[in-house]
Amino acid sequence: SSLTFTHGPGCITMAAALGRLLSRSLTAACSQRVAPRSVAVKLLRPSVLPILHTRLLSGRASAKAPKAPEPAFEPEPEDDEGEFEEFPVHTQRRILALRAVQTKYDTANRDYQSELAILQSKYEDVYRPIFDERAGVISGKTDVGAYDLEDDGEQDPKCMPDFWSAAFLNHEKIGMYITERDGDVLKHLTDVRVKVLTGAERGFTLIFHFENNKYMNDKTLEKTYMLEPEEDIIPKKFIGQKIDWKESSLDPTVEAKKKRVKSKEGGKGAKAAFVTELEPCESFFNIFDPPQVPDDPRALEDAELDALQEELAADFDVGYAISTQVIPRAVEWFTGELCNPMDDMAEGDYEDEFEEEEQAPPARDFGKPNRR
């Protein structure tokens, strides 16, 4: 499946974005550069793709069917001859002319993305005191007025310890990865900021600020998403941070499991022996240990490719949502104003509504009886 991100006037599928990310490693392994302009052609004509790219974008990697021998990878030619043989010659000429125009746009767009990053970085200085004020209200360092509201008898804790955890939970693309153990740690999250990268490396860094707590020694955690220079939402590389958990039992990314082992004594009646091992588990904090794309993705099995695609998509989903949606409008995510109304509908209610629609009589044309 492909996830679609909409940004400004255009949109791009996550499958295409991940395809770009993996194809970069693939072409590097083959010592052959693939020009950015060839990506659209590859998406339209999967027969020209290397076997990895085809499996990634089709999403139909078959584990049941016997594997056929993989064809040798043939680097794509740099020239455009033969790419559009299915079109008449007069159309091919116009396609080549349009490709030249597209190259001009790509050059201008790279300049735009570079200047946009500089402008975003400039406005970080404008946003900083605003976000500082917001952090003060959340932490209780800033007093707030009565706002003509009568006291309800509830004691004022002078802070909002669940602010960021609630905002994250209310976002459909973030909340699904937050476990109960994550929530306990996120109660100590005091602020989240985003820093735009400028210069040769484009992208953004998320900075999570924590108060002193019993879970970790880190005061800040950072996650960097480096992007392709041609587009602003195509990931190129993820950089995480090793979290310094105070105890393994407090680390929400692992869970202790008892495993039975053979008893040294052996024989009948011997007591079973168990050892406790830590195993990885689902956690929001896994985003700080991002998936790594191997130098040669072709060495991966179909199941490994599928798993890698899902991890990359989930990771970028979370980071992009935090930077572009939650941070700018955090209070509206905390209150739930920006939640998808479908998320609040109980599963049973949705099924009942679906059944009612199925059982409804067929619509009739105006002026004609509904004859059965």
Image: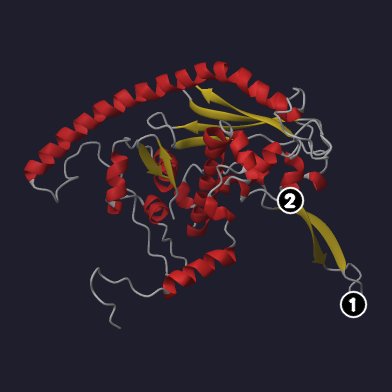
Residue that sits furthest to the bottom in the current view? 372
Residue 348 visible to the viewer: yes
x then y, percent, for residue 52: 41, 52
Q: Secondary structure at mark 2?
A: helix
Residue in the image at 43% along x and 51% along y: 2
- Location of residue 336 by image quarter: top right
- For the residues carrying marks 1 and 2, which lies nearer the camera in this image? 2
Residue 292 visible to the viewer: no
Residue in the image at 52% along x and 51% along y: 310
- Location of residue 95 by image quarter: top left
Q: Is residue 170 above or below residue 130?
A: below
Q: Is residue 219 above or below residue 83?
A: above
Type of colouring:
secondary structure
Residue in the image at 39% along x and 34% along y: 8
x then y, percent, for residue 322: 57, 37
Which sits in the foreground, 250 or 5?
Answer: 5
Position of 9 with respect to 266 (left or right) is left
Residue annotated with mark 1: 267
Query: Tag on residue 180?
Result: 2
Do residues under tags 1 and 2 come within 8 Å of each other at their CB atoms? no
Position of 131 with respect to 160 (left or right) is left
Which sits in the foreground, 251 or 46?
Answer: 251
| Dot 2 alpha-carbon crowd within 10 angstroms: few under 14, some 14 to 19, many 20 or more | few
The type of residue carrying mark 2 is: Glu
Among the two numbered marks 1 and 2 on one chain, the one whose residue lies closer to the N terminus: 2
x then y, percent, for residue 76: 28, 42
Q: Secondary structure at mark 1?
A: loop
Which sits in the foreground, 67 or 246?
Answer: 246
Quarter of the picture holding the N terminus: bottom left
Quarter of the picture holding the C terminus: bottom left
